[in-house]
Image (cartoon, rainbow, N blue to C red):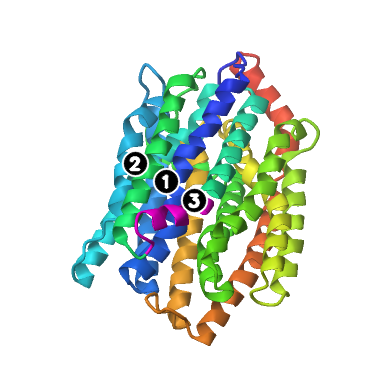
Amino acid sequence: MNQKTQKVGLFEKLVYGSGQVGMNVMYTLFSSYVMIFYTDTIGISASLIGTVILVSKVCDGLSDLVAGQLIDTRKSAKGHCIPVLTRWSLPLLIALALVFMVPDTNLALKTAFIFITYNLFNTVVYTYTTMAYGTLPTYVTNDPIDRSQMMIYAMLFAGITQTVMASTIAPMLDFFGGMDQQSAWVKSCLVFGVVGVIFLYANCVFVKERVDNPAPPENIIQGVKYAVQNKYWLISLGMCMATQVALTFNLTVSTYYLKDVVGNMGLMGAFIACCNMPGIVMMIFMPQMLKKFSKRSMYLAGTVIMLAANLVFAFSPSGNVGILMGTALIRGIGFGFPMGLNNAMVAECIDYGEWRHGVRVQGPLFSANSVAQKVGQGLLTSLFGFFLTAIGYIGTAEVQAAPTVSGIDAFFKWGPVVVTLLMMAFGWFFDLEKKLPQIREELSAKNSGGQE
């Protein structure tokens, strides 16, 4: 562990945060809209898409661990992470475009194409790129406050990007011919993707790696072993997964709720704005709040606010737009804390792991966030796909049957209540922060030769 504290200026923190524009314009388009594209534009059954996604997650979880190990053990003149962003940002856009280029052929070939392109983007290219981006702060600075602020700025830009995407994707699709036209999806993907690549390349130019941590074991099995023996890493894995599932309700399940229960998918932009804007405001003040409050206390406070809003919405009349938007605003205030703090809390597990096992494993440990994001999103999406088929959802139908609409309504109302309770439980057991001062003091003494 590098002994000299490496400080980072505000400009560099903001440039790093803006990299989430690049990651999120592509991943939001993929995670929020790919299922409704498959079911309603291409006409594939929701259960078949759910199966493809579920099988893909087996490969996806393994690829995160491999990517994390590769980043930790491979370095060029510009560092560990920046070279990955430089080489892989453009292929990320190409892989995303291929996802929406499903050929007009028989079902077997369509399914094979979907499986291959889904995994090319999600399991391979996005995994390696997002792992490099997510791990980058730990190579930029070893100052815990600066590192946490970088990650909070990243979540701030992520929330802004998701809000802008939700407000502009429908007009963009309409401009290119409508969401029922496959070509409109491809063209919209390319427009958003080019913007995203620009922000990723800005990181390559203006963000510098300064910290050269000791290399972890070359054996990835050993690296994973240290990860799973880190109890706080396992808790953070659950926290990240639950947070991503909650986000997927907002970004994916909501499209079906607004279309089939409320009857107005045009409200998507307003709904996402209500979900994200309060959290964005909270994230602006969060770097200063970190100096006064613990991450755990802020995380738990956020989940309490979320639970209250979710319960009010669950017991409200179906399709009430006012209650939908009002509770989304309140929930958004609470959700800003887990979204802004997850990465920072994962980063703390790195110091704990070095203190506990004597080995600083960054990539595999930091892969918790990426693994959890994709597995959480994938599990909920696949579960929702099976659920849609069970309740009789027909993607090409103009109007869904009454039992189908009722099922979507119940899933969207009560699912977030269960997920929020899980978030509260994980947050309660993550009590690492109060132990960190002593841990870092002992690490400093050990690395400076003060103790054996």
As drawn, the label of residue 192 is: none
Residue at x-position 48% and y-position 44%? 24
Majority secondary structure of magenta residues: helix
Residue of label 1: 26
Image quadrant where one finds the N terminus? top right
Residue of label 3: 168
**Distance from the alpha carbon under mark 2 to that under mark 1:** 8 Å
Q: Is residue 217 above or below residue 387?
A: above
Residue of label 2: 92
Towards the viewer: 392 or 119: 392
Asked whether, in this view, residue 324 is left or right of residue 297, the answer is: left
Q: Earlier in the sequence, mark 3 or mark 1?
A: 1
Q: x%, y% of residue 59?
A: 35, 54
Q: Earlier in the sequence, mark 2 or mark 1?
A: 1
User: Which callout, 3 or 2, points to the residue nearer the camera?
Assistant: 3
Q: Single out the residue that lies furthest toward the right.
A: 292
Towards the viewer: 64 or 335: 335
**Distance from the alpha carbon under mark 3 to that under mark 1:** 14 Å
Q: Are marks 2 and 1 in contact (CB under 8 Å)?
A: yes
Say which amino acid is labelled 3. Thr
Q: x%, y% of residue 272?
A: 59, 55
Task: Check disc 3 and report its element: helix, strand or loop.
Answer: helix
